[in-house]
Image (cartoon, rainbow, N blue to C red):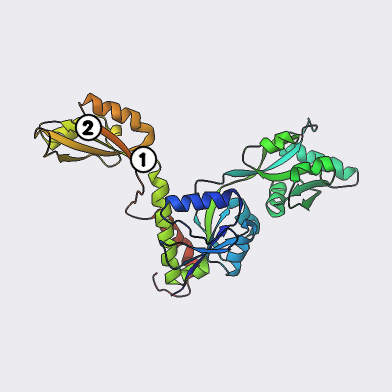
Amino acid sequence: MSNLRFALPSTGALFDGTLSLFSDCGLAVRRANSRRYTADIPALPGVDILFQRQSDITIEIDGGSADIGVVGLDRYHESRLETGDTVVLYDGLGFGAAKLVIAVPNSWLDVTSMADLADIALEFRAKGHDLRIASKYPRLVKRYLNMNGVNYVSLINVSGGLEAAPVMGYADIIADITATGTTLRENGLRILVDGTVIESQSVIVGNGRALANDSEKLSYARQILEKIEASLRSREYQRVTGDIQGESEDEVARQVMKRRELGGLDGPTISAVHAGKESNWFTVQVLVRKSDLPDVVSYFRELGGVGITANDVQYMYRDRCDSYDRLIENLKPFRESDDES
């Protein structure tokens, strides 16, 4: 049996978000202590957890030392091999939202767009030197600059403290990841109006060749995707239950369904109440979007409903797992045989 090697970020917002999501999904990670770089998932034997720097995870998956991993979409596109084996398994885990942006000093009053930046780069060139841009993402930034006609630039790879680069004088502008833009503003920097290089979020990526040709690893990956997809989908819904009086189940159903948008995701479930009330009471259950909850409760009351409760839904499965179906499609180029997994 082949264990699935799952690389998770060892620190930062993606570390916290991943552990929280997995706990909510019933896939809590068990780690002996914070200094250990290995762990497991008791609910899913056969999966080995490896804590790694986020900047290394995509490289390790491309190299085959990990099978799948959680990274930011920005880091995935920056680090992946163009002709490598990595594929995206799940493209939005609900945390880690940020943007890679190009920001200039506030003192550059006439520079508000990429077109303006292209002009400034030409002016710098005419004076005998290139526009210097500090960034941790040279590959993505260079590609974006080329797309926008910004030439004659020098990319300076900086590991930290980018916001100080223009003040300290080793770069003219920066390209950095930001969630809110607050740190940039506090350091006298302004994002160009069209200066968003990429909008990022947390994703699961994997080695397509390893998954396509190892049925055990693919099975573990499917179980993870199923749990995550069902858990994230359930966050949008609540189950509302109440007792409503009526002549029959059909008559109560007609009353509830008069307002189709409040009749639940798949229509109401209705059953007779056999104890504690007269025989013409029925329990009604509907699965509704959380945004519709106040209207649903009010409508139940209009129908004479009593004992109305609303409960969160832990998992919400469909007849198929969308993320797994997409994965299978993406794995076709990597299959070394025609065997189905």
Q: CA distance from mark 2 to mark 1?
A: 18 Å
- 340 versus 43 height, above or below: below
Q: Residue 201 appears at what percent x and percent y?
A: 56, 48
Nearer to me, 8 or 222: 8
Identify which residue is drawn at 58% across, 65% down.
61
How many dots with numbers?
A: 2
Nearer to me, 274 or 166: 274
Q: Residue 144 appears at what percent x and percent y?
A: 69, 48
Neighbor class of circle 1 (other Cα within 10 Å; few <14, some 14-19, many 20+) is many
Q: Residue 202 appears at what percent x and percent y?
A: 55, 50
2 or 1: mark nearer the eye: 1
- 183 versus 37 height, above or below: above
Q: Amino acid at mark 1?
A: Tyr
The answer to whether residue 91 is seen in the rendering is no
Q: Residue furthest right?
A: 128
The residue under label 2 is 256
- Left or right: where 254 falls relative to 45: left
**Could you say which disc has been placed on residue 237 in the image?**
1
Identify which residue is drawn at 62% across, 41% down.
179
Nearer to me, 227 or 263: 227
Q: Which one is earlier in the sequence, the residue at label 2 or at label 1?
A: 1
Q: Quadrant of the N terminus?
A: bottom left
Identify which residue is drawn at 72% across, 53% down.
138
Quarter holding residue 279? top left
Circle 1 sits in a helix, a strand or a loop, which is it? strand
Q: Residue 308 appears at what percent x and percent y?
A: 26, 32
Circle 2 sits in a helix, a strand or a loop, which is it? helix
**Could you say which disc has been placed on residue 161 in the image?**
none
Neighbor class of circle 2 (other Cα within 10 Å; few <14, some 14-19, many 20+) is many
Q: Amino acid at mark 2?
A: Val
